[in-house]
Amino acid sequence: MKIQVLKLTAILLILVVILVSCKKEEKCMSFVTIAQGSLNVDVEEVSLQQGIVIKTQKEWEDLETIMDGMVNFSETEIDFDKYQIIAVFDKVRYSGIWSIDVISITEHSNKIVVKARAYSLSGSTSPTVISRPYHIVKMPISSKEIELRYI
C-alpha cells in the first residue's frame, strides 16, 4: 500500500513538473515510454548515470540485444525516419527500491534538453538489492544535439 501511494505521489509530481517546465523560448516535446524499470546488475557494472540517443535500427537492435530477457518493451518496431529513442540509466543502486523518470523534453533553438530524475520508492534499505533504474522513451526525430540533465 505504501509503495502504491509513493508511486502515485511520484506520478503527480512528474505531471506538475511537465506542466510548468517549459518556458516561452522552449517548446515542450511529446514522448512515449517504451520501457521502464530496474535492471538487476552485477557490482562490476559502471555506476555512473548515463543516457543513450538511438537514431538507427542497428543501435536499437544492439540495445535490445543487451537488455534481452530483462525488459518488456511496449513496442519494438520503431520508424527511425520519424522517431528517435532516448534511454536514460540511473547509477547502480546498492539498496532500496529506486526508479528514474524522463520528466520533460524541451526543444530550444540549438538543442533538445531531456530532463530525468531518479527517486527512491521506499524509505527502507535492503543491502541485498542491487539495481540500475532505466527509462526508455520514443520522441520525434531531430538533428539537434540532445543534452541530458539529471535533476
Image (cartoon, rainbow, N blue to C red):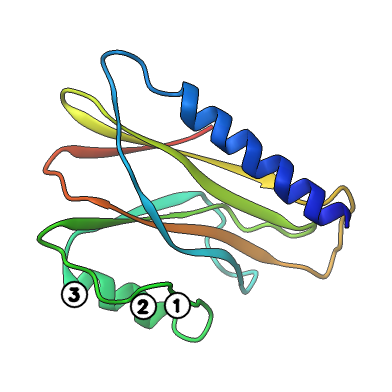
Disc 2 crowd rating (10 Å Cα; few below 14, some 14-19, many 20+) is: some
Q: Secondary structure at mark 2?
A: helix
Q: Which residue is the site of mark 3?
A: 58
Q: Left or right? Give the position of 31 relative to 35.
A: left
Residue displayed at 62% across by 74% down: 42
Q: Return the residue at label 1.
A: 67
Q: Earlier in the sequence, mark 3 or mark 1?
A: 3
Label 3 to label 1: alpha-carbon separation: 14 Å
Which label belongs to residue 112? none
- SS at circle 3: helix
Front residue (pair 47, 18): 18
How far apart marks 3 and 2 lie (CA) works out to 10 Å
Amino acid type at mark 2? Glu
Q: Name the residue located 19 percent from the left edge and 38 percent from the top edge.
A: 145
- Observer-nearest residue: 53 or 15? 15
Give above or below for 107 relative to 25.
Answer: below
Residue designated by label 2: 64
Q: Hey, what amino acid is under mark 3?
A: Lys
Do the numbered discs 3 and 2 sit on residues whose CB atoms are within 8 Å? no
Q: Residue 85 in the image: x percent, y percent?
A: 29, 58
Q: What residue occupies the far top of the structure in this picture?
A: 24
Disc 1 and disc 2 in contact, CB within 8 angstroms:
yes
Could you say where residue 29 lies in the image, as x and y percent from the top left? 30, 37
Establish if 78 lies above or below 99. Answer: below
Whether 122 is drawn above or below 34: the answer is above
At a point 86% along the width and 62% down the height, the residue shown is 126
Residue type at mark 1 is Met
Name the outermost residue toward the bottom: 69
Q: Residue drawn at (15%, 63%), measured in percent from left and top?
A: 80
Q: Quadrant of residue 81?
A: bottom left
Label 3 vs 2, first from the N-terminus: 3
Local secondary structure at mark 1: loop
